[in-house]
Amino acid sequence: MPRAVWKGPFVAVSLLQDVMALARKHPEWWSRGRFQGVNAPEIVNTQSRASVVLPDFLGCKFGVHNGKSYVPIEVTEPMVGHKLGEFSATRVQAVHKKKEAKGAKKPKAGK
C-alpha cells in the first residue's frame, strides 16, 4: 500500500540537515552552480535508503550505503520521487564458471 498523500514524502531528518548544511557551506553553488551543471563540492553520505529524492536534491551527490560501502550517486531530474535505495544495489550478481565442452581436452603442460 502506498504512503498517504497527506503525509508527504519521507525524508530522514538527518539527511535534510546534511543537505541544508551543504547549502549553507556552499551558497554560490547551491543558488546557481548546481543548475548550470557544476559538480557538487562534496558528497553527503547517508544510510537512509528509504528517503525519497526531493526536487531540492537536484545536482547533489549522495553516498548511499549498500550494507558494505557507500555507493556514489548524483541526483538527476528523473530520480525525483524515487527512493535513494533504488540506486544502490545491495546484492552482487552471481558469476558461475563456464563448463568445458565434453570432447575438448586440456593441453598438457609438458617438457
Image: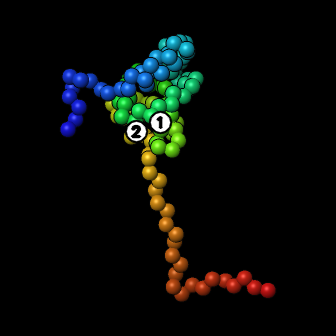
Question: Taking 105 as reference, is 74 left or right?
Answer: left
Kindly identify which residue carries mark 1: 64
Residue found at x 32% / y 27%: 10
**Residue 66, position as x, y percentages in the image:** 46, 42
Q: Left or right: 80 with respect to 70?
A: left
Q: Does the image show residue 74? A: no
Amino acid identity at mark 1:
Val
Pick the front one: 51 or 106 = 51
Q: Position of residue 32 (x, y in %)?
A: 51, 15
Residue 84 quadrant: top left
- Disc 2 target residue: 85
In this orientation, which residue lies closer to the viewer: 7 or 27? 7
In the rendered image, the vertical position of residue 57 relative to residue 71, given as above or below? above
The answer to whether mark 1 and mark 2 are in CB contact below 8 A is: yes
Mark 1: few/some/many CA within 10 Å (<14, 14-19, 20+): many
Colouring scheme applied when the structure was drawn: rainbow
Residue at screen point 57% across, 84% down: 104
